[in-house]
Image (cartoon, rainbow, N blue to C red):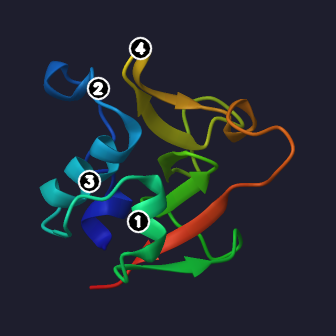
């Protein structure tokens, strides 16, 4: 998991700019040689490849889920509070504030199980 936590996939480049959130997470893990069968947000929870963890346990590269959206967690983002590194087809790959996706609920955190 060190490759994900060091930031593999935490860059903007043209090859990943217009992908959705689940593809960004999948491609980032794939770049770090942590392969799993592609899953959308709902499928990731049921895949058996990720286990729920608390916010306090979350580390860079863990997955954040909010409703129908997912992102990679970065506890030390370039802009305060923008700990979600995610993607939307319309806005591309970027850091964001998790409350943008669901103002009522905290995101849920998941860690890959090798």
Q: Which mark is residue 90?
A: 4
Instruction: Identify the secondary structure beneath mark 2.
Output: loop
Picture coordinates of residue 74 (x, y %)?
52, 50
Picture coordinates of residue 70 (x, y %)?
50, 48
Of 69 and 76, the residue lying toward us: 69
Comes first in the chain, label 2 or label 4: 2
Q: Could you tell whether 35 is left or right of 60 in the image?
A: left
Spatial CA distance of label 2 from label 3 is: 15 Å
Spatial CA distance of label 1 from label 4 is: 22 Å
Spatial CA distance of label 2 from label 4 is: 15 Å
Seen from this angle, which residue lies furthest right? 104
Of 84 and 19, the residue lying toward us: 19
Q: Could you tell whether 70 is left or right of 114 in the image?
A: right
Residue indicated by mark 3:
26
Q: Quadrant of residue 94?
A: top left
Comes first in the chain, label 3 or label 1: 3
Spatial CA distance of label 2 from label 1 is: 23 Å
Q: Quick check: marks 1 and 4 in contact, CB under 8 Å?
A: no
Comes first in the chain, label 4 or label 3: 3
Residue indicated by mark 1:
44
Q: Quarter holding the N terminus?
A: bottom left
Instruction: Identify the secondary structure beneath mark 1.
Output: helix
How many residues crowd mark 3 within 10 Å: few (<14), some (14–19), many (20+)? Answer: some
Q: Which mark is residue 110?
A: none
Comes first in the chain, label 2 or label 1: 2
Residue indicated by mark 2:
12
Q: Residue at x 40, y 39 (%)?
A: 21
How many residues crowd mark 4 within 10 Å: few (<14), some (14–19), many (20+)? Answer: few
């Amino acid at each position: 998991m060190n490759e994900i936590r060091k930031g593999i996939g935490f860059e903007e480049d043209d090859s990943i700019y217009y992908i959705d959130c689940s593809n960004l997470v999948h491609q980032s893990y794939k770049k770090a040689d942590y392969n799993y069968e592609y899953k959308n947000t709902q499928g990731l929870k049921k895949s058996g490849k990720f286990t729920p963890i608390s916010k306090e346990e979350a580390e860079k590269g863990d997955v954040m889920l909010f409703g129908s959206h997912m992102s990679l967690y970065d506890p030390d983002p370039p802009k305060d509070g923008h700990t979600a590194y995610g993607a939307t087809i319309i806005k591309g790959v970027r850091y964001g504030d998790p409350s943008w996706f669901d103002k009522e609920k905290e995101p849920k955190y998941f860690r890959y199980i090798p």
